[in-house]
Image: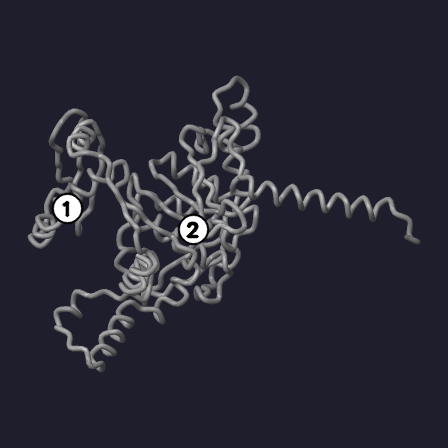
């Protein structure tokens, strides 16, 4: 997960413990009470899965008219594990993480190749005095990169295969491209990522020569085009990275649209613009008389609805300057949104300083 050796992990997380308080009986009861409808794709086979409330079984329906023998074998191998995962992590089907390093994934994917890294590590082990069973090398995965970066690199290496099938959220990706990038992130026949601007469609720019916003959003765009499935959890570290304030606001609106399509989104942010826009989305979702008319006039249609009951916020901070441990405190979310004191304090202080300096310049005599 963290891309460190076992020895370092033991030192960093000494005494770390996770306890599951839910009993087996409670777990069984909770599973029986859930209901959902989903689809999974294994190889080229599409399976519709239905779980009704108060039933101890799931209904499976093959959506394909025919299937190849090797695809049926793939289904036999992985269907049960996918079903267990689907039930255990309900209401999420899976998670997709976009780390801060996402702006370098497609720029340096070939240089940071997982296959190259594993080959190098195995070559180094072969040259060492340590005796290793060859089967150990087959099972061992590189610990050089944290899991989210590793997953991103593996997708980048196999993007040509991912791009053969469009996800049902392909249009969302196009919308983000048009609104935020004013262009299109494309994949060449050779598997190279390029950018084509709407203002110069005949020109194709390699990803490493594009603006930072293109590098930052390319992972999200490819995810929505080719990988995304219903009810996934999207985790984004600092979505404001390399984005102009206006684009931060637009991206926050897109998050609301994705949430209304069944996604759940977890973000960590230091951006006052994103926090403010989330609050605007919360307030514009109010069912109080007259709010919807004002919201519509301001450009907040129902597709951006984000009821405050669907939002949770937490503040990660030190108790005081001398504290060594970070505390996690829930933030109250109401129909008018929520406040992040650490951000608000900084903004208020800047405003006070600006006002004092402004009025000092405006009303002071030249001789002073």
In the depicted structure, whether residue 90 falls above or below residue 12: above
Return the residue at label 2: 237
Color scheme of the displayed model: one colour
N-terminal label among 2 and 1:
1
Q: Is residue 342 left or right of residue 366?
A: left
Judging depth in this view, the residue of 189 and 255 nearest the camera is 255
Return the residue at label 1: 81
Judging depth in this view, the residue of 32 and 233 nearest the camera is 32
Q: Residues within 10 Å of mark 1 (few under 14, many from 20)?
A: few
Judging depth in this view, the residue of 320 and 82 nearest the camera is 320
| Cα distance between the residues tagged 2 and 1 | 29 Å
User: How far across and down, in percent of the image, does residue 246 sit?
Assistant: 56, 46
Q: How many marks?
A: 2
In the depicted structure, whether residue 332 falls above or below residue 42: above
The residue lying at 39 percent from left, 67 percent from top is 108
Quadrant in the rendering for residue 91: top left
The residue lying at 15 percent from left, 74 percent from top is 132
In the depicted structure, whether residue 35 falls above or below residue 276: above
Specify the quadrant that holds the N terminus: bottom left
- Callout 2–callout 1 Cβ contact below 8 Å: no
Judging depth in this view, the residue of 145 and 278 nearest the camera is 145
Q: Residues within 10 Å of mark 2 (few under 14, many from 20)?
A: some
Farthest right residue?
367
User: How far across and down, in percent of the image, does residue 163 sit?
Assistant: 29, 55
Q: Tell me the number on the disc at residue 11.
A: none
SS label for mark 1 = helix
Farthest top residue?
289
SS label for mark 2 = strand
Q: Is residue 178 left or right of residue 67?
A: right
- Any part of residue 159 in sight: no
User: How far across and down, in percent of the image, does residue 293 sit?
Assistant: 54, 23
The residue lying at 50 percent from left, 26 percent from top is 335
């Amino acid at each position: 997960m963290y891309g460190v050796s076992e020895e370092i992990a033991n030192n960093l997380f000494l005494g770390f413990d996770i306890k599951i308080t839910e009993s087996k009986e409670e777990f069984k009861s909770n599973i029986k009470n859930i209901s959902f409808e989903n689809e999974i794709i294994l190889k080229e086979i599409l399976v519709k899965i239905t779980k009704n409330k108060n039933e101890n079984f799931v209904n499976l329906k093959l959506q394909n008219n025919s299937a190849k023998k090797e695809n049926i074998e793939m289904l036999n191998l992985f269907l049960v594990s996918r079903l267990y995962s689907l039930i255990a992590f309900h209401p999420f089907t899976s998670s997709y993480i976009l780390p801060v390093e996402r702006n370098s994934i497609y720029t340096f994917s070939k240089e940071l190749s997982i296959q190259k890294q594993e080959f190098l590590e195995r070559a180094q082990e072969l040259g060492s005095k340590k005796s290793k069973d060859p089967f150990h090398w087959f099972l061992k995965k590189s610990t050089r990169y944290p899991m989210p970066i590793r997953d991103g690199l593996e997708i980048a290496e196999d993007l040509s295969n991912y791009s053969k099938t469009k996800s049902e959220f392909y249009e969302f990706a196009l919308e983000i491209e048009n609104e935020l990038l004013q262009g299109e992130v494309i994949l060449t026949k050779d598997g190279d990522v390029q950018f084509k601007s709407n203002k110069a469609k005949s020109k194709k720019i390699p990803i490493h020569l594009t603006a930072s916003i293109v590098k930052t959003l390319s992972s999200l765009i490819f995810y929505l085009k080719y990988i995304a499935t219903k009810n996934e959890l999207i985790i984004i570290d600092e979505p404001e990275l390399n984005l102009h304030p206006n684009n931060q606001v637009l991206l926050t609106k897109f998050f609301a649209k994705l949430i209304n399509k069944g996604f759940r989104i977890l973000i960590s942010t230091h951006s006052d613009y994103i926090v403010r826009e989330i609050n605007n989305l919360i307030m514009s979702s109010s069912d109080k008389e007259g709010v919807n008319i004002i919201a519509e006039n301001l450009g907040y249609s129902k597709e951006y609805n984000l009821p405050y009951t669907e939002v949770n916020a937490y503040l990660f901070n030190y108790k005081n300057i001398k504290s060594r441990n970070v505390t996690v405190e829930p933030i109250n979310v109401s129909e008018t949104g929520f406040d992040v004191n650490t951000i608000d304090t900084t903004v208020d202080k800047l405003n006070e300083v600006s006002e004092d300096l402004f009025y000092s310049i405006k009303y002071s005599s030249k001789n002073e």
